[in-house]
Image: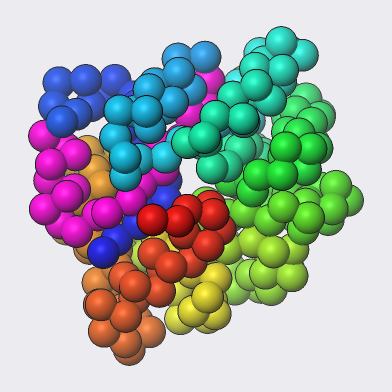
Amino acid sequence: MLFDTHVHLNVSHFDEDREEVLARAEQAGVKYMVVVGFDHETIPKAIEMAEQHNHIYAAVGWHPVDAIDMTAKELAWLEELSNHPKVVALGEMGLDYHWDKSPKDIQKEVFRKQIRLAKKVKLPIIIHNREATEDIVEILQEEDAKEVGGIMHCYNDSVEYVDSCLEMNFYISLGGPVTFKNANLPKEVAKYVPADRLLIETDCPFLAPHPKRGKRNEPAYVQLIAEQIAALRDISYDELSQQTTKNAKRLFQIQD
């Protein structure tokens, strides 16, 4: 039983074979997944998928790359959607210093607004971080995000910052890069994170794990990620699967 905590099955990459992708995920043992919406196009599709499938849940947020496009109207929309019974988190949100579409000050402002909304509606948050770890940790601390906690999505930084995230009630989620041969940082993190704070994800269609690297990622491949982390932690695949699924259900407050 696997829980893929971060998928983008709501993007155009899956328009031709979405149902086949879902069938392969089921065959691979993926019992739950969260579809993450991050803009005007993907948020309604995330909600739609969650409504159509019992095992699919949704997260809604505004991506930092597009922070410059977010207005009070979008924030109110997110608040409205947060009441949907299948919406289990707000995000992805955060900071992205790789792309230059949205200035850093605007990204930070939009990030803070979404954290405050999450505290208002009492939902955990999903953090997108690209080349901005220090600023993200600082903002999470200043905004007292510990109150709702959440996920450091596709964690790609050193062990050094893990404790700060754990102290703020965040889970560490690992994806495809933990399987890359020369990716030492995520492998160290996979061994370091406490068992009750570890999550797995594909971030599909991005970051496909080895040996699918370079191809379109899909939820079935979370099995490869689970196998790698289990080997790194020297535990059984079943134990890793059960623990990470239990963790995700606890965070998202999912009860069968």
Identify the residue shown where x is 66% and y is 44%: 123
The x, y position of residue 4, in whole percent, is: 35, 52
Image position of 176 with respect to 45: above or below: below
The x, y position of residue 181, in whole percent, is: 29, 68
Identify the residue shown where x is 72% and y is 37%: 121
Identify the residue shown where x is 23% and y is 27%: 14
- In the picture, the quarter occupied by the N terminus is bottom left
> Farthest right residue?
142
Picture quadrant where residue 170 is located: bottom right
The x, y position of residue 222, in whole percent, is: 27, 57
In magenta stretch: residue 178: no
Q: Is residue 133 left or right of residue 130?
A: right
- In the picture, the quarter occupied by the C terminus is bottom left
Determine if residue 22 is in view: yes
> Farthest front residue?
256
Q: Which residues are magenta?
A: 20-39
Image position of 135 with respect to 115: above or below: below
Along the line of sight, which residue is nearer the eye, 116 or 56? 56
Image position of 83 with respect to 170: above or below: above
Q: Is residue 83 left or right of residue 54?
A: right
Determine if residue 63 is in view: no
Q: How many marks?
A: 0
In magenta stretch: residue 30: yes
Along the line of sight, which residue is nearer the eye, 2 or 207? 2
